[in-house]
Image (tube, grey):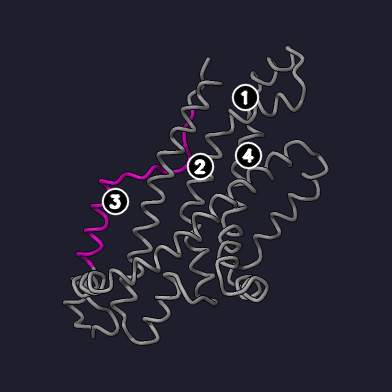
Amino acid sequence: MKTVRTNATTKLNLKDLGISILLILFVWQVIVWLTNVPPYILPGPMRVIEAFVYNAELISQHTLVTATEVLIGLVMGTVLGAATALYLMMSNTARRFVMPILVLSQTVPVFALAPMLTLWLGYGLGSKIAMTILIIYFPVTSTFFDGLRATPSGFLDLADSMQATRPRILLQVRVPAALPSLASGIRLAAVYAPIGAVIGEWVGASQGLGYLMLLANGRVKIDLMFAALIALCGFTILLRAVIDVLCNRISRWSGLFI
């Protein structure tokens, strides 16, 4: 008998998203009109769009750098987080000693780690990828581990009655049942990963959207800074939509086994 599962993570609705974006742009423009704020403090949406079009090649080059950091960090962080969750599930010792360390690590501000990573790994992709991994590692580990522990008792009783070994129960029962939870963690990671990359670029970089934002801000080109921010938001939304499709397939695939 298949169980009905509900996904705790809200799925991305592109139609509602489009309406929300239009509403934000409208409110933004109204604020500019009513306050008559100078463009070097808050440019209007049309001015930002003009800056985006005029600097499209520059923005695309920096977007490619940030996208590379995010995608590599997302894959590596997801694999590392999933492997850690499996290890925690298999080892009582790890649950006693490693899990508290993971929880304790979340009390350290991410901004505090970025300068050290830049010092150790340099100003290239390495420090940005490491920052991305750090910011998504715990959400993936935590959600997948919770899913592994929440396997329906009926499935476990059936596996025990068939004298299945502990590794087989983990791989053939717990993992398929926990895939929707892993999918939720990956959805969260898709949103957090760009944040980690940009934080790393803010601390020290010569490329990327975070670097472009700082450069534009330093030259009082606020319209360009907003254009870079819009590019980052667009990339994050696209990444989240792609991850949504992949995670839906993962959830459907897990339904074939449970």
Of the pair 179 and 120, the residue shown nearer to us = 120
Mark 2 or mark 4: name the one nearer the start of the chain.
4
Residue denoted by label 3: 17
Residue denoted by label 4: 146
Of the pair 60 and 139, the residue shown nearer to us = 60
Looking at the rendered structure, the kind of residue marked 2 is Ser
Mark 1 or mark 4: name the one nearer the start of the chain.
4
Q: Count neighbours of disc 2 (C-alpha within 10 A) and say few if under 14, some if 14 to 19, many if 20 or more.
A: many
The answer to whether residue 246 is above or below residue 213 is above
Residue denoted by label 1: 152
Mark 4 or mark 3: name the one nearer the start of the chain.
3
- The residues tagged by marks 2 and 3 sit, at their Cα atoms, a distance apart of 19 Å
Residue denoted by label 2: 184
Q: Which segment did they paint magenta?
A: 5-27
Looking at the rendered structure, the kind of residue marked 1 is Pro
At x 66%, y 74%, the residue is: 116
- The residues tagged by marks 1 and 4 sit, at their Cα atoms, a distance apart of 12 Å
